[in-house]
Amino acid sequence: MSGTTSRRWHGRARLRAALAGAVLLLPAVAAMRPVRAAETRAMNARANERTTWDSVFTLVQAERGQAAYAKECARCHAAGLEGADAAPALAGSAFQGAWNGQILEELHARIHTAMPTDTPGVYSKQLVTDVVAHLLRANGFPAGAQELTHENGALLGIRFVATRPGARTRAAQGARVPSTR
């Protein structure tokens, strides 16, 4: 073989080896893709995440939820959401502490799949969404211009945050700064 032919042959051999290696790596790269896609979705969700303080429901929706709650939920959880017997309170510090930091999808799913305890899963997703709006309003969260929706994973992007962001605690508000006089 001449020098030019030898270089071509070795170049082609290297190319074939590189292609063979790439073909062997494709399944491994493809297997990593769903993990990366899930991580990317999670990072995007956190970046776009809203909280219960971002006016995520309307007053009209909360009123529908209040009517549904009175008809379907008050028999166990009491009319004022204070809970009774084995049914926990759905308003106040215990409720807020239990759900603080969780996404609204978890609260929605719990109600939708586990309530009522005697016939779980009978409530429509829309009714549950309206009841969640009522619970948010009863716990002091602000209403807004758009209804809360259970569609398209919207509840995955809303985190239950018990304390208003930027709000100081009562102790901090009452604390006095020592005078430097």
Image (tube, rainbow, N blue to C red):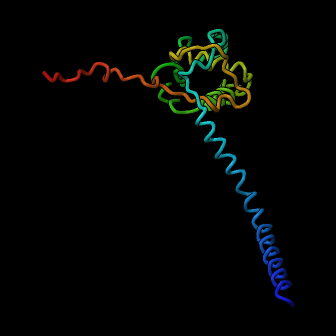
Measured as percent of width and height from the top left, residue 25 is found at 75, 66
With respect to residue 154, does 30 lie above or below? below
- Where residue 18 sits in the image (x, y, percent)? 77, 72
Task: State whether residue 71 is above or below residue 128.
Answer: above
Name the outermost residue toward the bottom: 1
Which quadrant of the structure image shows residue 170?
top left
Give left or right: position of 176 versus 52.
left
Q: Is residue 69 above or below residue 22?
A: above
Q: Which quadrant holds the C terminus?
A: top left
State which quarter of the image contains the N terminus. Answer: bottom right
- How many labels were placed on the picture? 0
Percent coordinates x, y for residue 157 in the rendering: 63, 31
Please report the residue visible at 77 percent of the width from the left and 62 percent of the height from the top: 27
Residue sticking out furthest to the left = 181
Viewer-side residue, 161 vs 45: 45
Residue in the image at 74% along x and 24% along y: 122
Between 63 and 17, the one lying in front of the other is 17
Give left or right: position of 47 versus 172. right
Residue 135 lies left or right of residue 1; in this view the side is: left
- Image spot of residue 150 (x, y percent): 70, 25
What residue do we see at 47% from left, 19% from top? 92
